[in-house]
Amino acid sequence: MLPLIDEATRELLLANGREPERDHRPVLKLFNPAGPASWLICAMEADGDTLYGLCDLGFGEPELGYVSLEELKEVSAGLAIGLERDLSFRGNHSVSVYAKAARIAGRIVEDRDALQAAMGRASGRSVR
């Protein structure tokens, strides 16, 4: 079983955490393969535990916020399959774009059209 965060990803997250004012791209996607919860993580604080990103617990209200890596590990250990990293995920947009698209859809989405529509709304343009 792979660790939730490998060392290279950890370094990227820590670097992003040193620039909290920036609208970073997510560098890590975690998900529950047996349920609806998923997280797009873009930063880690210096404590090595506090993660920041888009959190979707599957209740239709994804939001930007903080989550504890240790708590995610505890949740993972309590699941039959455990939380997994999406090794194919590439954050192509800032986390705020993913958040806008998620609020519209009621869940984290990676669909290109939904993300472009969210980018259009962020800039005040209509995107078709």
Image (spheres, grey):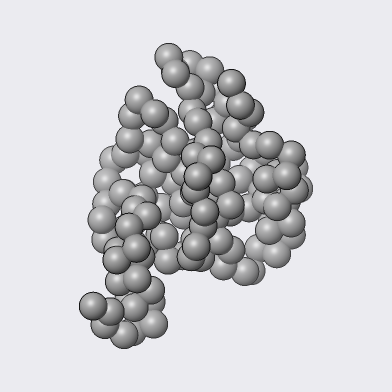
Percent of width and height locating residue 125: 31, 85
Q: Going by the image, does 4 lie left or right of 63?
A: right
Residue 48: horizontal and vertical position, in percent? 72, 40
Which residue is more in the foreground, 59 or 81?
81
Check the image and name the residue furthest to the bottom: 125
- Residue drawn at x 44%, y 18% as measured from the top left: 81
Q: Position of residue 82 (x, y in %)?
A: 48, 22
- Name the one closer to the observer, 70 or 82: 82
* Residue 108 shows in the view: yes
The residue drawn where x is 69% and y is 56% is 17
- Residue 75 visible in the current orientation: no
- Farthest residue to the front: give it: 88
Examine the image and state in which quarter residue 74 appears.
top right
Q: How many marks?
A: 0
Q: Residue at left 47%, top 43%?
A: 39
Q: Nearer the viewer, residue 86 or 14?
A: 86
At x 34%, y 78%, the residue is 120
Q: Quadrant of residue 31?
A: top left
Q: Quadrant of the N terminus?
A: top right
Q: Quadrant of the C terminus?
A: bottom left
- 43 vs 76, left or right, is right
Q: Is residue 97 left or right of residue 27?
A: left
Q: Position of residue 98 (x, y in %)?
A: 41, 60
